[in-house]
Image (tube, helix red, strand yellow):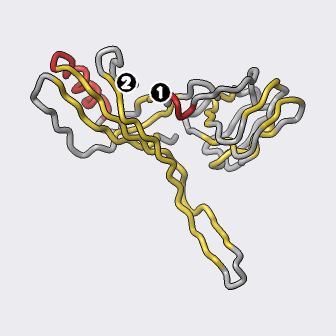
């Protein structure tokens, strides 16, 4: 799951896209309905920039990951958490499919929009309502859990790393002193 050596290969133009399939209707009365009808996943696009001496690292990365072997990508500013919160863990076992996660007592606040990840699986989830620490706090997340969450499982909200697989069909290498290539990837969900 090694990523590019970011001391030699510079990453730029990173975009993260939240993909969710919706079905939406509007009735004659004006009522608007929106339902999720498919999986939610993140897609990623980034550009690797390198000097000619470092092309072997780029070729290694492609060789290791072009056949759906996942890699971890540091989500940087997208998952940056600037608040204050102590250790956050689930207070009971929660089955996959749930959107409500009971949490143990913690100090602080996790605002809506915070991207979190559970200790035992790599799927990225978004907090949909602010969670104020204390007794009996509950996290409301989107999408619903893809895997069970165990009692005492840590909720990671700082420096989250997404797990992705490459989706590029072609890899074109410029033969010049300075090279760059734009990679595309989809979130690896297991």
Q: Is residue 85 toward the left or the right of residue 118 in the image?
A: right
* Rendered position, 106 above or below 20: above
Of the numbered discs 2 and 1, the one sitting upstream in the chain is 2
Q: CA distance from mark 2 to mark 1?
A: 9 Å
User: As rendered, which of 128 and 37 lies closer to the eye?
Assistant: 128
Q: Is residue 128 left or right of residue 92?
A: left
Q: Position of residue 46 (x, y in %)?
A: 36, 36
What residue lies at 10% left-to-right and 29% top-to-bottom?
175
Residue 152, label in figure: none
Residue 59 location (% of width, % of height): 22, 26
Q: Secondary structure at mark 1?
A: strand
- How many numbered discs, if any? 2
Indicate the quadrant where residue 182 lies.
top left
Q: Residue at x 52, y 30 (%)?
A: 77
Residue found at the very far left of the displayed protein: 175
x then y, percent, for residue 123: 56, 38
Counting other residues with Cα less than 10 Å from the Cα at mark 1, is it few (<14), some (14-19), or many (20 or more)?
Answer: some
Callout 2 environment at 10 Å: few (<14), some (14 to 19), or many (20+)? Answer: some
Mark 2 = which residue? 3
Extreme residue toward the bottom, this view:
28
Relative depth, front residue between 12 and 100 = 12
Q: Residue at x 76, y 45 (%)?
A: 100
Q: Is residue 64 left or right of residue 148?
A: left
Q: At 29% across and 27% down in the image, what residue appears? A: 61
Q: Is residue 111 above or below residue 50?
A: below
């Amino acid at each position: 799951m090694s990523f590019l050596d970011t001391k030699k290969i510079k990453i730029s133009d990173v975009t993260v896209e939240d993909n969710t399939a919706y079905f939406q209707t509007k009735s004659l009365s004006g009522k608007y309905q929106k339902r999720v009808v498919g999986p939610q996943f993140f897609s990623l696009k980034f550009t690797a920039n390198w000097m000619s001496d470092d092309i072997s690292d780029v070729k290694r990365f492609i060789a290791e990951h072009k056949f759906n072997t996942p890699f971890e990508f540091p989500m940087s500013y997208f998952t940056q958490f600037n608040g204050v919160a102590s250790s956050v863990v689930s207070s009971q076992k929660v089955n996959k499919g749930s959107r409500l996660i009971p949490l143990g007592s913690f100090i602080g606040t996790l605002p809506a929009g915070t991207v979190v990840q559970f200790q035992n699986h790599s799927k990225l989830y978004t907090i949909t309502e602010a969670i104020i620490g204390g007794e009996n706090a509950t996290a409301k997340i989107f999408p619903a859990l893809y895997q069970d969450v165990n009692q005492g499982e840590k909720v990671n909200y700082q420096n989250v790393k997404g797990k992705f697989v490459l989706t590029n069909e072609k890899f074109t290498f410029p033969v010049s002193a300075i090279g760059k290539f734009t990679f595309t990837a989809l979130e690896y969900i297991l």
